[in-house]
Amino acid sequence: MASMAQSPALLAGNLASKPTASDLLGSLCNGICDVPLKALGRSRLGAKRRDFSIVAKVKKGKKHEYPWPEDPDLNVKGGVLSHLSPFKPLKEKPKPVTLDFEKPLMDLQKKIVDVQKMANETGLDFSDQIISLENKYHQALKDLYTHLTPIQRVNIARHPNRPTFLDHIFNITETFVELHGDRAGYDDPAIVTGLGTINGRSYMFMGHQKGRNTKENIQRNFGMPTPHGYRKALRMMYYADHHGFPIVTFIDTPGAYADLKSEELGQGEAIAFNLRTMFGLKVPIVSIVIGEGGSGGALAIGCANKLLMLENAVFYVASPEACAAILWKTAKASPKAAEKLKITATELIKLQICDGAIPEPLGGGHTDPHWTSQQIKTAIIESMDELVKMDTETLLKHRAQKFRKMGTLEVGGFQEGIPVDPIRKVNMKKKEDPIVPISMTSESELRDEVEKLKHQVLEASKSSGTAARPQRGLKEMMEKLEIEIDYEYDEAVKALGMEDKFLTLREEAAKGRNLPALDEKIEQLKGELAKNLPFAPNYNSLISKIEMLKELSKSGTNKDELKIEINKRFGEFMNRPDVKLKVETLKAEIANLGLGASDLDSNLEIKEKVMQLNGELESEFKTVLKSLGLQVVPRNQDAALEKINAFNEEVHMIIDDVVNSSDLKERIELLKAEMEILGNSPDEDSKAKILSLVAEMKQTIEDAITFPELKEKHERLTAEILESSNGSLNQEEEEDSQIKVNQDTNHRTFV
């Protein structure tokens, strides 16, 4: 011990200043013989153990300023809050993402950028043009986002740049401390929980957290929680219930993570336990759907007194793609599924599942995250002010009653207690009704009804003019004939084995992608149907009903009503978003060039664009008029039409003579016999034989109507019409009249 007594003088240097293991024991004893233990760290313990020493390094931890730093970095967006969470502002600004239905707006946006660039390069003042273009862009944006379809809202809810749970939290809270762990060995990053304050009131916040880029999404598991995440949320619910903190949950998940490990750890049990627990919590609960709320994964933190949704959020039991794959065997039917599922905020408010919609800026919440967050903050404060006034018993009843009344007659749902039909009970899946009811009226009965109506119309027009025509009976009969014709077309398509092709084309048309290629496919399918339609077993019945409808249309036309209908259709046509966008884009281009109405002729490029747009719109509107059974002809052409009709009558007489000739009659009878023998499924050789017979019959009729005298008469009639209309009947109309004659020839041949 004598050697130890000398150690203070020997070790009083810098060895004593370094922290050693003995420092940690300093509180136990002041030393041996009044020598501090700190001084004995490397002292000699005798001659036998001269080389023995005790050395320890204590790692200095990062200094943590708790709970708030006194001098936060003011240059960091988010201020104080950014120091207390690993959720930091992104170093790089997210890349803009354009959704498919937003692409038409990009043309206007590009023009605005081009004009601004031109102004910067030339130094000229284009402020008026820029303001005009911006106004048109905002109007087009407003028109688009006020008429969104359900599938478009789904795409907005899944937008990569949409604000996440923590984005909103840091925008609406004054203070926020994140709480981690489920106290069972894991901290699921897909669910974030923490305490925060809004206007001095403390809340327990919890929500699904998606990533803002690929790296974060992988870290957060794309917002799909495991059982650990739901158990972490459950722990925080108990904590909030114990301390009296109101709970606010944010829902944004495609669903709970459905892998093997999650199922082994009890995914279903964790969700079910949360559902049961939330109905017994004695504090107010408000849930907000900020993106997509998928199935039980969303409901596990969504059993609240009030459920609010952002305007473009969706809440569903199954995604539209999954629903379409189950019901229609293809995910391509997702637009139809999204519409049928009623998953938008508007539809869920009608069903009283959602208690209110929170507005978003035009373009979605990602265009102005801060404004969106402030709307959420306002909604939270208003809802909580209402709920905190309730006592505990009222609050629990309010929450239970909200879910108990879902699906009842009170909200347009089902009714319990009605006995189920025993036959239906065997297979509860309801059979789909046919799109068109089966025709119960025979062709002869339809013909008698049409003739009777025509006679009534004729008598009424003779006695008291057009006003006394039986318009109601005409309209009903025409609607009946249209249903019959639609049914005949459906049956013909099924008999020809073309049903799958039409369904595929309808799905492509619903998406609205690649319109030029789609138009080409439609024309090809129309051509294929026109070619094969004569082989359909119900072809004669179809043609007969079409003729009946045409006869009724001619006999029952009221000019005043027709004008009103045409004007109505024209207004609807010009107000279509795509038509308005085309017209406004061209107007903006003309305005940018500073051209007046008198200057258009001098600018060939603009003149060509105007003529091209005029032609496109005219062609599209002709299609609209054709759907009304109308044909567009030039004005002041009554005399010309009379001559054309007289010429057509002459052609018809020639065709009748040819058809009634013995040679052609034999071929027609042969054709009928072949078709009766072959039935509904002719083979390739038989089809070729039938087509050969049809071609021979066509050729016989064409030879009859193309003899020199008739051809000369046709040319003379064409010249007279051109001269009387000062060239208004152009080559295209002349071709249309010739096509009409040829089509009429073919039609009469097959009938």
Image (spheres, helix red, strand yellow):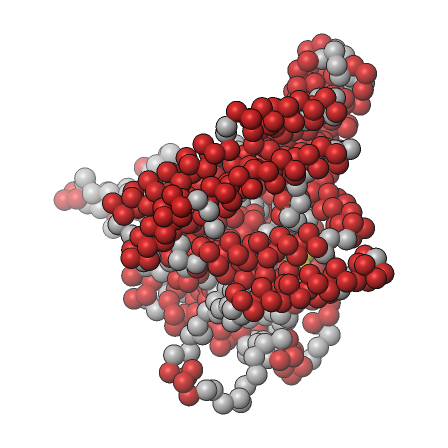
Q: Percent x, y for residue 344?
A: 59, 59
Give the farthest residue toward the right: 464
Give the farthest residue toward the front: 662
Q: Is residue 194 left or right of residue 729?
A: left
Residue at 67 percent across and 59 percent down: it is 357
Can residue 68 be seen by looking at this rendering?
no
Can residue 729 be seen by looking at this rendering?
yes
Q: Quadrant of residue 263?
A: bottom left
Q: Percent x, y for residue 12?
A: 37, 37
Residue at 64 percent across and 70 percent down: it is 352
373 w.r.t. 194: above or below: above
Q: Percent x, y for residue 534?
A: 41, 49
Residue at 64 percent across and 54 percent down: it is 551
Q: Is residue 281 left or right of residue 613?
A: left
Q: Percent x, y for residue 129?
A: 76, 23
Asked whether 542 or 303 is in front, the reply is 542
591 w.r.t. 134: above or below: above
Asked whether 638 or 333 is in front, the reply is 638
